[in-house]
Image (cartoon, helix red, strand yellow):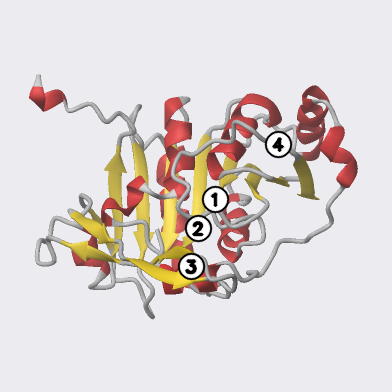
Amino acid sequence: MKNNDDRKSAVVKAPSVALQEQHDDLTRPSAELTQSVAKDVSTERARPLIFIGNDDGFRSGGLAALIEVASRYGDVVAVAPYEHQSGKASAITVDTPLRVHRIKADLHTVVYSVNGTPVDCAKLALNRLLPRKPDLLLSGINHGYNSGNSVIYSGTMGVVFEGTFRGVPSVGLSYGDYMPDADFTPCLPIVEQVIEEALAGGIAPGVCLNVNIPKCDKVKGVKRVRSARGYWKEEFEERTDPHGRTYYWLTGSYHNQEPDDPETDLYWLDRDYATIVPCRPDLTAYDQF
């Protein structure tokens, strides 16, 4: 979840994957699309199948960086929103037809864009586009943190929760640089470590991981912690449009209620450590029974 200033910069085009949209894919039957994906990715069953989604859109530099790393571990199918979709959480589209564009295809990587939300992309992939159930789901790398309670608003984590619902080991990855031209090089060792552990069975059933990586010269280490308690101080700025009509623009910042607690993610992110928070999409308060 980004504040107002961050959102304004985040919608600028980021470094993109190779953009060669094949518009004939837009009207092809789902079965034909699935066959196309199966042909595009390697047929080596020994290679893991990795699905990648995000909320920053298919042009995102974070998506390109994640695809580059993940493709060394398995066959990658990425399905990402056509436009920037930050803050969409688990929203789905119910009143607009969804269209699929193929952006890139080679031996071990296929990239699609969809005119929908991050979870629309995940649902389409898991229901229609993937040749089989993926061995791993990754979402990101998000431009900006999804720490603390921001996980509730995050489209990045909405994709992760959708994968967890389907029994797929799922990980969200976010980087503390909100700029569209962010350099994701400092993230790569952490991404590699997370992928290796996840593919080795390091994620329990029903659990997913929320990984945040600080923007710094060198990440000092990784801490497994909980989300910091807090809330967004959302102050709506009142403005007037050129026609004299009033409208409101969302601004705000995150208020950390536990800035000195070493059990929380924000505490360690402020000290140049990456954090891993295990999450469950099941919101039931079992302790209240």
* Coordinates of residue 53 in the picture (x, y in percent): 57, 46
Residue 46 can be seen, yes or no:
no
Toward the viewer: 15 or 186? 15
158 in relation to 144, above or below: above
Contact check, label 2 and label 1, Cβ < 8 Å: yes
Callout in the foreground (4, 2): 4
Contact check, label 1 and label 3, Cβ < 8 Å: no
Judged from this view, the residue extending furthest toward the right is: 24
Give how far apart the Cα atoms at labels 2 and 1 are. 7 Å
Q: Which residue is mark 4?
A: 98
Q: Label 4 sits on what residue type?
A: Leu
Q: Which residue is mark 2?
A: 141
* Coordinates of residue 182 in the picture (x, y in percent): 53, 74
231 in relation to 165, above or below: below
Q: Which residue is mark 1?
A: 54
Count neighbours of disc 1 (C-alpha within 10 A) and say few if under 14, some if 14 to 19, many if 20 or more. Answer: many
Mark with earlier residue (4, 2): 4
Q: Is residue 73 left or right of residue 160?
A: right
